[in-house]
Image (cartoon, helix red, strand yellow):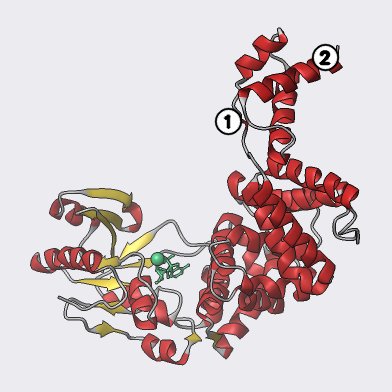
Amino acid sequence: MVKWSYADPKMAEQSERVLQMLLHHGYEAYWVGGCVRDELIGRPVHDMDLTTSALPEQMVELFEHTVPTGISHGTITVLLHGYAFEVTTFRIDGTYENHRRPEEVTFVKSVVEDLRRRDFTMNAIARDTRGRYLDPFAGQQDVERGIIRCVGDPEERFEEDALRMVRCIRFASVFDYRVMHNTWKGLLNKRDKLSFVAMERIRVELEKVIAGAHPLKGLELLGRSKLLTYAKAAVDCSRFNRMLVRHMDRIPSVEVHLRWTLLLYSGHFSVAEAEQCLRNWTFTKQDKEQICDILKLDEEIKELINILEANDIGNPDLMKKQRVQWMSLVLKFGIVTAKRWIELHTLISQDEGHEVNEWMKLCSRWNTEMNAFHLKELDITGREVMALSGRAAGPWLGQMLNHLLLQVAVGVISNHKESLIREVERVDNNHG
Ligand code: ATP
Ligand code: MG
């Protein structure tokens, strides 16, 4: 068995069985692309792609469970013991139109031809079932030196498929590699071709930059190359405030939404602008909401409490009022968003002064003092409230329930049926 130090041993074993099966039937077959590269770099291997001389229909014959993932491009997925492997026939791409990957491909006999069509030398290495690396473009050497280099002539390669320029910056950023001089020069000369590439494909790469280990490096390269000013939804990276963005490295990569919020915050994006921008960048609705909710909370809180300017910590009456206002915002936006907002301002408090930090500590304390977060936690149902008030459902009901929730959250009333009933009656009486 071939030794993989950075791949799940079971996944490696099953993928090797796929390769053996192909070899046994007289085809050539290798591991290729990201998995080989990550093994050489020493990063966790997430999936294992395979390449073979077998044609898709021959693979379908050979394996019991297959999915025709991209038959026209030569790719089928082989399912084996809970693992899925994309197996692609050796191929070269057809003619490139509009600087995008072509729809048509041509199957070829030689693995080296297949490797030649790949973007960077480190992505153009194959590995065989004896563990040997097939590395016609010296990708291993580039990995050792920490270099991103195009396979072949950079200008040609970027001209063919302009997305490769974003991938170039993505890899340099995530791996903290240098871009080889000629490759960088090619990128600068061909950057205007990015306007032909679908925003969705660009967004996928940008997400990897921001979620990666060195997002600042990626932003720096994007800024220096001005690459994104040529995208369909153009972005001028000089807008992002470097002093603020530099804190991004301190946000754990699992908190990727907060990283995006920091980026937009640093560029003084209003909520409306941020929403438009993320929509243009084809972010999903869910991601857009998670990112923009923090900005929304920020806008609302600044209106309500003027928290970032007030120096009234210690004024008891004001504090009481602000505690309630804070808690009502936590109920509105949810505790996750509230915590992210605190994290954002704690991070940048160095730039905004000591007072902000004090406020963030206070907000965190207020969070821990909250007695409820959701309507479903209340010891009373909407139905019960309707029966008590003797009224049909309507907007008043939501208002009443939210009122009860806030009263419970801040600790004015306890979350017991009797006190909740008393509060409903009190409000009803007050409103006649
Ligand atoms: P990741 O680890 O993020 O998946 P990857 O290099 O595996 O990175 P994929 O998009 O999965 O990226 O592509 C698999 C392989 O296909 C790459 O390693 C590369 O060899 C080749 N490839 C992908 N995109 C391109 C492209 N635009 N031009 C040329 N070759 C590409
Ligand atoms: Mg991959």
Q: From the image, which quarter does the N terminus lie in?
A: bottom left
Pick whichever, 426 or 88, lies toward us.
Answer: 426
Q: Which residue type does callout 2 highlight?
A: Asn
Query: Residue shown at 54%/66% (left/top)?
Result: 208
Amino acid at pointer 1: Lys
Q: What is the quadrant of the C terminus in the image?
A: top right
Inspect this view and state whether residue 235 appears.
Answer: no
The image shows residue 184 at horizontal and vertical percentages of: 60, 83
Image position of 97 with respect to 321: above or below: below
Judge whether 407 appears above or below 232 on screen: above
Question: Residue 40: x percent and y percent?
Answer: 35, 82
Numbered disc 2: secondary structure: helix
Residue at the spot 54% in from the left edge and 82% down from the top edge: 176
Relative side of 65 to 150, left or right: left
Label 1 sits on residue: 376
Ligand 1, image quadrant it occupies: bottom left
Cα distance in 3D space between marks 1 and 2:
25 Å
| Mark 1 burial class by Cα count in 10 Å: few <14, some 14-19, many 20+ | few
Badge 2: residue crowd in 10 Å (few <14, some 14–19, many ≥20):
few
Assign a secondary structure to mark 1: helix
Mark sitting on residue 429: 2
Examine the image and state in which quarter residue 80 appears: bottom left
Question: Cβ(mark 2) to ligand 1 < 8 Å?
Answer: no
72 or 422: nearer the viewer: 422
From the top left corner, tell me how far across and down residue 69 is, in percent. 33, 51
Disc 1 residue lies near ligand 1 with CB under 8 A? no
Q: Quadrant of residue 46?
A: bottom left
Q: Nearer the viewer, residue 103 or 335?
A: 335
Q: Position of residue 86 (x, y in %)?
A: 30, 59
Q: Tell us which disc is closer to us: 1 or 2.
A: 2
Q: Is residue 7 left or right of residue 181?
A: left
